[in-house]
Amino acid sequence: MINEAMYEYGSKSSVIRELFAYGLERKKVVGEDKVYDFSIGNPSIPAPPQVKEALLELLEEPAEILHGYSPASGDPEVKKQLAESVNRRFGTHYTADNFYMTVGAAASLNISIHALTDPGDEFITFAPFFPEYTVWVENAKAKLLVTPADTRDFQIDFEAFEKLISRKTKGVIINSPNNPSGVVYSEETIRRLAEVLRRKQKEYGTSIYLISDEPYREIVYDGTVVPYAPSYYENTIVCYSYSKSLSLPGERIGYIIVPNEAAESKRLMAAVNGAGRALGYVCAPVLFQKTVAKCADITGDIQAYAKNRDLLYNGLTKLGYECVYPQGAFYLFVKSLEPDANAFSEHAKRHDVLVVPSDTFGCTGYVRISYCVSERTILNAMPAFAKIMEEYKAL
């Protein structure tokens, strides 16, 4: 017999992926420029030129170095260079020993969750949240509890959050800048979160780890600063990916940081190595380990995303849509024009506008619009958004 849990995961793709696949087929019918696909967070801006330069330089290295195995946790020199980069930017004091190189943020999170979890443990996250958290936590034989969204400002509803914390709480997962809302947790929010977790640790005599999911850390606008979570809370694990900052989603490269300040940090890092081994995530792609080390302080053209944000936000609010103002990432969270966001998403498909209903993110009544698309796609979609608004007003 096959594993029924794995069958369920494999036979039911995510709503995001289903919309993306639908869009690809629909473009074959009506034309590439007639489908306004805002479904998936696939960066549209090219990787910065330094990435190509680094790759060309690296390709001159001997094949056995470039294409051979690195140690399971990553190339020591790569980890050293990344530690130096993080230290420069955040005033930390990491070394190579604090890093574990991963196959993207999904591997970072999966490994971290498995490294912490005993069967029956609980994790808490905050709606709206990336839906794969549920899969990864459940696969570790733990349970994910969701703090309802505070739709006033999409910061944290601390009263609701504290009610979910118990002796079973092993970890809390945050994502800032947030997918799907684009909101950045303020310094006040992070400070308060740290205070609550310290207080609950003392109350229960346990360690509660904060897993900071940070693939959008560099994609922020208007001078917004993303608080660096380990600077506020000792028991933090950082999960990072270069998919968004360097426009390298298909190369699957990222890392985990386990700070020395974290409880049982050496045992925790050993557990990270063990989880990577058990899950088969050892030795991230060496070519791209070396590439990101050379490009550690570089990002793509964030201003291109800022321009898209302004075009979309200003265009939709002018039409009468209610939108959460994004401080980071490349998503716009828009109030559905009817209570059922899935029905609204289906209605939008009639106009070849593909938007993701918010139910999958644990927050009803909204849709996510990914604006890491071409400027032309946004401009061409505006008449369709206007038509959708007209049709709802006529109901």
Image (cartoon, rainbow, N blue to C red):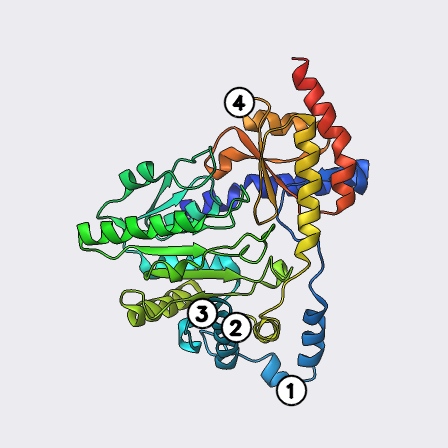
For the C terminus, which image quadrant?
top right
Question: Which callout, 2 or 3, points to the residue nearer the camera?
Answer: 3
**Residue occupied by mark 3:** 91
**Residue occupied by mark 1:** 62
* Amino acid type, label 3: Gly
**Residue displayed at 59% across by 54% down:** 219
SS of the residue under disc 1: loop
Measured from the top left, where is residue 242 in percent x and y? 57, 62
Measured from the top left, where is residue 120 in percent x and y? 26, 48
Neighbour tally class for label 1: few under 14, some 14-19, many 20 plus, Cα within 10 Å: few
Q: Does residue 21 lie above or below 319 as drawn?
A: below
**Residue occupied by mark 4:** 339
Question: Which callout, 4 or 1, points to the residue nearer the camera?
Answer: 4
Question: How far apart are the two marked residues, 4 and 2, measured between alpha carbons?
Answer: 46 Å
Q: Does residue 187 lie above or below 28 as drawn?
A: below
**Which of the 4 image quarters holds residue 111?**
bottom left
Question: How far apart are the two marked residues, 1 and 2, measured between alpha carbons?
Answer: 26 Å
SS of the residue under disc 3: loop
* Amino acid type, label 4: Pro
60, 11: nearer the viewer = 60
Neighbour tally class for label 3: few under 14, some 14-19, many 20 plus, Cα within 10 Å: few
**Residue occupied by mark 2:** 85
